[in-house]
Image (cartoon, grey):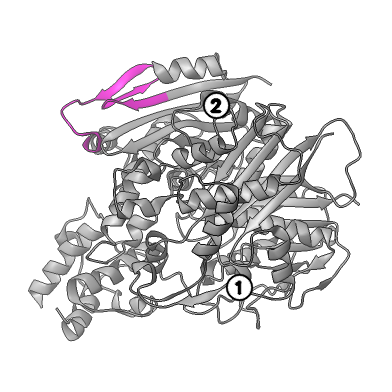
Amino acid sequence: MNLCISKYCSIKNNCFSVNGEVVFANSELSATEFLTALYRHEQIGYPKFFKMDYLAKTGFLAADLLLKGTAFYGDSLKQTMGIFLSNNSSSLDTDIAFQKTIGKEYFPSPSVFVYTLPNIVMGEIAIKHKIFGENTFFVSQEFNDRFVRDYVNQVFVEKDMESAIVGWVELFDQHCEAFLMLVEKEKGTINFTQEIIHKLYKS
Amino acid sequence: MSTVYIQSNNIISSLGFTTEENMCAVVSGKSGLHYYKENTLDVPEGFYASRIDAEKLNAQFALISNLECSRFEKLAILSVHNAIKNSLVNTTDSRTLFILSTTKGNIAFLEQDTNNEQAYLWHSAQVIANYFKNPNTPIIVSNACISGISATIVAKRMLTSGNYDTVIVVGADIISKFIISGFQSFKALSQKACKPFDANRVGLNLGEGAATIILKINDKGNCLPKGTITIENEAISNDANHISGPSRTGEGLFLALQSVMKGRKAEEIGFVNAHGTATPYNDEMESIALWRMGMTEIPVQSLKGYFGHTLGAAGLLELIISAESLRQNTIIKSLGYETCGVSHPLHIITETKTKEITRCIKMVSGFGGCNAVCMLKKIS
Amino acid sequence: MEQLIAQLKREIIEVLNLEEITPDDIDNDAPLFGEGLGLDSIDALELIVLMEKNYGIKLQDANQGKEIFKSINCMADYISKHRTI
């Protein structure tokens, strides 16, 4: 079984790229303003975007633009697609926002609380694109390309997964970064190996 | 064909510091739930929960170490320590991996300081792995309430991939103002002891706990001792429906059950340990999924009436009790249940009793629309 | 009442992150949930917080919200009768 990265994208330093080519950039904006600018530029048309926290916005945007133009885009039911994401700060950015709602003025906000779990970003991606497969969120100090590659590979080997969205989605205090790969069986020319993942992530 | 099995385990909860203590308490019908009045943990409204006594925890931890670390880390370290005792696990071996399952870790630190490195989950995971002198970067699974089963599944795959010989999975979460107020904002908490699947259920109770399982793989065709519990099959899925409300058709859980039950008949399953949080929607969703699978005749129970919902520890803690149930041929009463409160009547266990059982199902669901199911099998 | 309705609309748009909606887009009698604005269960919980924070009205039961949040007019009516701040 040969696993390939059929497409990849990244958000880094207010620059959005697909397969290594810059698609949209704007260094004048803050990181979170950039997310909204990217959303509008790509005309995604999904009002729920504005209810998401910044981590979910980051991952949702990256995933949407990763799938755009592929057979997976849209609401066809995808039971054999998985989502495997990781980050450094879990949901800390929103945790701090929620903490503010339970300070001296105690009015805990449910719409903030729901995002104090890092896996919610996968829920948002799954909802829009009707992805029913495996989904697991990992936390690590740095992107653990070796573990992610080995683990996702094992899921492809053992289960009936045909494709997966894999990568790193990080948002904390205006530091925003996403690196997502669309991994498929026998499709594309970029092999899903640790060395290649590392190279693409760092580029 | 290789088999992944539980070599040893531990539970720490308000019911005790060992699996044996916890299982005994459960079999005798004892609940760890209590009412905590307003202003406990600085929360304006009172709440029902299962909390671990701070003095007891500190005293137990002091017996093994004088390491300065957080309550959350003490709980996790103590649980792993207790699981490792009397096992032959070498935690310093590079073929041994640690996996931590938690939803909020040291989140309480945000109350004092939002710039605190201790609030990062990888910080706690490293404290735990360093304590046991493990050379590998610990893996952290943070996937809402399914974290414990997800972590178990990750562990199994790290063994079947051949990358490791032993995986130590520890799950823990502690109750804090952060977590209680969040669930209160969702109006998800019950002001009384929770009643899973009951017609009068109104919500969940939170619980504190830690649980550890040590998984190994038998890939040399050796005979495992009678009574060994194996992870026979597993699945994770998503409802793709809503970020907090479970699917009204139980879609994700149904798909996960379908995957795990492939090749098996309902009669082969001794019991189902449900997520059974006692919220109106969760329990209804689980009944729908079981009905769609034709599994409504299988005895079902929830452990939330004993332990409360222990979040990142829940999947692991309840898996261990389920494993003990298999080992002891005992099905456990679903505490809090009186009358059927779901649209597809289930065979809720109303009395703890002996039953010859070989297999069970453990299922969990969580915010983000995620679901996970595990099938356990006893070597007989 | 008109002032309350205008204020309520602004507050709802802000608190529920209805970025692409203006107060003029919200019909005073249109259902807030289901069709209309298409709000969901989390929005309903957030409106309960808004009632308490901005108007001092504490709803004990989330189910009370079903009647009160039927439309902007319903909400404004209830608030004007029960507000404590």
Magenta highlight on residue A32: yes
* Disc 1 versus disc 2: nearer the observer: 1
Query: What residue is shown at x 20% (from left), y 84% (from top)?
Result: C82
Which residue was labeled with disc 2? A183
Magenta highlight on residue C73: no
Which contiguous range is marked in magenta?
A9-33
Q: Position of residue A72 (x, y in %)?
A: 51, 34
Q: Quadrant of the N terminus of chain B?
A: top right
Q: Nearer the viewer, residue A78 or A151?
A: A151
Q: Is residue B173 above or below residue B355?
A: above
- What's the residue type where badge 1 is placed? Pro
Asked if residue B310 can be seen in this view, the reply is no
Q: Give residue B196's mark.
A: 1
Question: How far is mark 1 from mark 2, CA to CA?
Answer: 40 Å
To which quarter of the image does residue B129 belong? top right
Q: Position of residue B109 (x, y in %)?
A: 36, 51
Q: Is residue B267 above or below residue B187?
A: above
